[in-house]
Amino acid sequence: HNSALAAPWYSTSSFSLNPPTSSMVAPVHVMITGAAGQIGYALAPMVCRGAMLGPDVPVVLHLLDIAPAEAALKGVAMELVDAAYPLLVGVVATIDVAEACKGVDVAVMVGGFPRGPGMERKEVMGKNVAIYKGQASALEEHAAPGCKVVVVANPANTNALILSNYAPKIPTKNVTCLTRLDHNRALGQVSQKTGVPVRDVKNCIIWGNHSSTQYPDVNHGEAGGVPIREAIGDDAYLNGEFIATVQQRGAAIIAARKLSSALSAASSVCDHVRDWVNGTPAGTWVSMGVVSPGGEGAYGIEAGLMYSFPVTCVGGEWTIVPGLTIDERSRGLMDATAAELKEEKAMAEELIAAM
C-alpha cells in the first residue's frame, strides 16, 4: 500500500497536518477499524471535534480498513484534511494492521464481517473469530501499553472476549464492548415517553449481550429526579413495549433508512470512551460491556463472560455499581442473556479449536 497515506504529522507526508506546538497537550492516538464504512465515516469527524476525548485534546487518527476499501479510505483521509480540524494533528490511513495499531491509545473496533441474509450465526462468528484473533495479536504487539479497546462489530461481546483472550498483555479491564448505544436508546425512549429532556434522564441499565436478549432495566433510573417507573406510571409498557423497542431499535432503523444506525452508534462510541477516560458524572452510571469478575460484585454473572453492567468510571477505570436490588423478574432476564453469551463463548471456543 501507499506508505505516504500512512504517515502521521511528524513525517514529511502530504497527510501531515498541524504539528503540535509545545503548549499543546500530547496528542492521543485513536484507531478506528472499518474506517471507510458507515460508522467510521460518522465517527471520525466526532473524534476530530473533541466529542470523544474533550475540546482541548489533540488527536492522531489511525484509520484501518481492508484492501477492497483502500481507495475509499484514502478519500476519507482526504476529507479529514479538507475539514481542517484544529484538534487533528495527523492521519494514518492504512490497510496494514500492524501499522494501524502502532502506538494507539484508544482502539475502536468497528470492522468485522456483517451477517448477511440467510447466514447462520455460526458462519458469521467463524469469520469474526479469525478477524479478532489477528487484530488482538497486532494490538498486543504494537499498541501503547495502556491502550483502551472498545469493540463495536457484532457479535460485539464475543468479538471483545476473543480479542481479550488473544491479547493477554492487554489488561482484561481495558477491553470492552459497546452497549452504550442500547443504554442511550433506553434514555431516549424514557425521555420521549415522559417529556423530560434526555439530559435529565439517567441510570437506566443494559444487562448482558448487545443482542435482542439484552435486558434494558429502568428499575433504578430517574427522569427529572423522579424514579422512572413513577414518572411513566405504566408498568405494562415498561415491562413490554419499552424493552422490545430498545432491543429491536437497530432493526427498526435499518427498516427505515435501509442502512444501519451509524450516526447513533458513532455518538455512543464517543460517550463510552469519554466517560471511561474522563469519568462519569457524580451520581450517574452508564452501561459498558466488560469481562465479568464473577461473584456477588458481578450480580452472580459467571466470571469470564463479556457482559454489560452498570458502571461508574474514575481515573480511566470502570467499577460495577454495587448493591442494586434485583427483583425476580430482572434476575430471570439477566440470566437469560448470560445463557446466550455462554453459548456464544462456547461456539467461539469450538471455532478457535478447529482453526
Image (cartoon, rainbow, N blue to C red):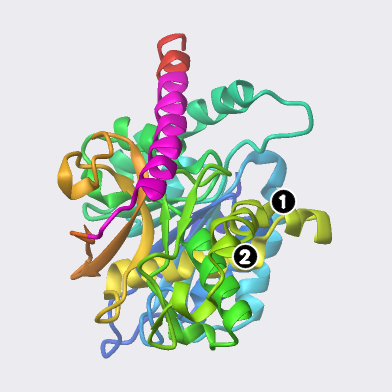
Q: Please tell me whether mark 1 sits on a helix, a strand or a loop.
A: helix
Q: Tag 1 or tag 2, which sits nearer the N-term?
A: 2
Q: Position of residue 52 (x, y in %)?
A: 43, 73
Marks 2 & 1, CB-CB < 8 Å contact? no
Residue drawn 20% across the image and 71% down it: 314
Q: Position of residue 159 (x, y in %)?
A: 45, 37
Give the crowd class for mark 2: few <14, some 14-19, many >=20 residues within 10 Å: many
- The answer to whether residue 15 shows anywhere in this view is no
Toward which corner of the image does residue 243 lie, by quadrant?
bottom right
Q: What's the residue type where badge 1 is placed? A: Ala
Q: Give residue 39's mark.
A: none
Residue drawn 51% across the image and 77% down it: 48
Q: Nearer the viewer, residue 220 or 179?
A: 220
Q: Is residue 350 left or right of residue 252?
A: left
Q: Please tell me whether mark 2 sits on a helix, a strand or a loop.
A: helix
- The answer to whether residue 210 shows anywhere in this view is yes
Q: Is residue 303 magenta?
A: no
Q: Give residue 77's mark.
A: 2
Real-space CA distance between mark 2 and mark 1, rounded to the nearest whole angstrom: 30 Å
Residue drawn 43% across the image and 17% down it: 352
Judged by depth in the image, the label closer to the viewer, 2 or 1, is: 1
Q: Nearer the viewer, residue 224 or 9?
A: 224
Q: Give residue 251's mark.
A: 1
Find the magenta span and give its range: 324-348
Q: Position of residue 355 (x, y in %)?
A: 46, 12
Q: What's the residue type where badge 2 is placed? A: Ala
Q: Nearer the viewer, residue 204 or 288?
A: 204
